[in-house]
């Protein structure tokens, strides 16, 4: 298979079928960087409104670097993988302090910034700076695995290195930005995980999996591990018309986000005395459980969650947190201005209805 033929066919297809996306209307390295961070493990349709709001509020590295992390997290709320936002905020600060606000085009320097891994570096350096660096993401792996019938499971440790070699071989060094976007675009629009549109694929005549009628068998994947399930009892503690919320530690899972106090619980009915004692140990407060408000379910990447939400009354004591980063007593209105993670959002409407006079 001649690489030059692959390049010609792919670039020709991309010139005609490329989507009009907001980050393709700019050559600003910062804007392209923001888009690539958001697009990691997130669909384009989901990213577009977040990107537009983010760039409207933080149009340059200086604006992002000078922002409060709580505002950044609030704008990111619902997009998930919040470490991306925290790292981008920290990296913008370094770009401003070390490089006068200009995104560095030196690969080693750019890789030294928080959150800049191999994929982000390759995407930004090729798209924003025209450097001949191949991009390897999930879309690219899928295209290459079918095109070449690569049997290495795409989710296996070390697979990236296997796919890096053919990605570099096919890369058009004269037009690396267009080529990298073209192969990712092909994976997103045509060479889809399920029901690929091989009839419209510019590479169908070259694709080994298509030729052997094996498209459905690629890419190979190792069997996923069973995702664990967790059950929580969540306490909405009321005191003089306000509710207690706590902030998660900045560097941990969902770092910097706010939530209602929660403790591990057994599946089924929550034991009242045990729940009150555990919440007291976590918050320093003596509380009284009134009633269950609702049950929510949520799926994270590494586990699923069932949460029973209970309305509680503050009985005595002052807040002395065991593990959370900070706390606030808030009204429902001020609560909605804080960055909350998605599982807590799932019962806000029920909470508002319960608190109506």
Image (tube, rainbow, N blue to C red):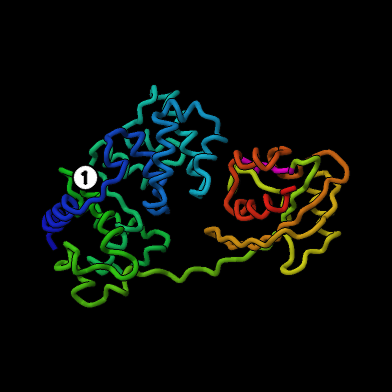
Residues shaded magenta: 243-250
- Quarter of the image for residue 219 reads bottom left
Provide the residue designation for mark 1: 176
What residue is shown at x 86% (from left), y 59% (from top)?
273
Q: Please determine whether, in this image, residue 232 is positioned above or below residue 15.
A: below
On the picture, is 30 further left or further right than 334? left
On the picture, is 44 further left or further right than 90? left
- Quarter of the image for residue 296 reads bottom right
Q: Is residue 246 located in the magenta-colored stretch of the structure?
A: yes
Q: How many marks?
A: 1
> Percent x, y for residue 97?
45, 23
Residue lying at the far bottom of the rendered structure: 213
Indicate the secondary structure of the residue bearing disc 1. Answer: helix
Q: Is residue 116 located in the magenta-colored stretch of the structure?
A: no
What residue is shown at x 25% (from left), y 49% (from top)?
180
On the picture, is 106 further left or further right than 224? left
Q: Please determine whether, in this image, residue 119 is positioned above or below residue 329.
A: below
Foreground residue among 16 and 144? 16
What residue is shown at x 58% (from left), y 42% (from top)?
339
Q: Please determine whether, in this image, residue 210 is positioned above or below residue 119.
A: below
> Percent x, y for residue 52?
39, 39
Foreground residue among 165 and 252? 252
Q: Crowding near pointer 1: few (<14 within 10 Å), some, many (20+)?
A: many
Helix, strand or loop for the magenta stretch, by majority: strand
């Amino acid at each position: 298979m001649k690489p030059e033929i692959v390049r010609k066919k792919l670039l020709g297809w991309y010139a005609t079928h490329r989507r009009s996306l907001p980050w393709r209307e700019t050559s600003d390295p910062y804007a392209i960087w923001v888009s690539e961070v958001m697009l990691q493990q997130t669909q384009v349709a989901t990213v577009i409104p977040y990107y537009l709001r983010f760039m409207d509020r933080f149009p340059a590295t200086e604006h992002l670097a000078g922002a409060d992390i709580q505002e950044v997290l609030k704008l990111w709320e619902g997009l998930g993988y919040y470490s991306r936002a925290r790292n981008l905020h920290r990296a913008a600060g370094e770009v401003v302090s070390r490089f006068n606000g200009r995104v560095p085009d030196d690969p080693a320097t750019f890789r030294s910034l928080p959150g800049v891994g191999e994929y982000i570096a390759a995407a930004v350096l090729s798209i924003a700076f025209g450097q001949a660096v191949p991009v390897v993401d999930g879309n690219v792996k899928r295209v290459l695995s079918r095109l070449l019938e690569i049997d290495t499971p795409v989710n296996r440790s070390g697979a990236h290195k296997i796919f890096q070699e053919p990605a570099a071989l096919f890369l058009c060094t004269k037009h690396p930005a267009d080529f990298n976007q073209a192969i990712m675009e092909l994976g997103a629009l045509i060479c889809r995980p399920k029901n690929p549109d091989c009839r419209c694929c510019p590479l169908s005549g070259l694709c080994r999996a298509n030729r052997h009628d094996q498209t459905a068998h690629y890419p190979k994947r190792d069997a996923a591990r069973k995702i664990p399930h967790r059950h929580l009892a969540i306490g909405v503690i009321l005191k003089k018309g306000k509710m207690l919320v706590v902030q998660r530690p900045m560097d941990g899972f969902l770092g910097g986000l706010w939530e209602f106090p929660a403790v591990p619980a057994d599946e089924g009915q929550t034991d009242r005395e045990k729940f009150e004692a555990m919440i007291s140990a976590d918050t320093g407060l003596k509380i009284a459980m009134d009633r269950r408000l609702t049950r929510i379910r949520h799926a994270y990447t590494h586990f699923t969650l069932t949460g029973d939400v209970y309305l509680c009354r503050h009985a005595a004591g002052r807040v002395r947190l065991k593990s959370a980063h900070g706390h606030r007593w808030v009204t429902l209105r001020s609560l909605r201005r804080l960055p909350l993670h998605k599982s807590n959002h799932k019962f806000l409407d029920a909470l508002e209805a319960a608190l109506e006079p």
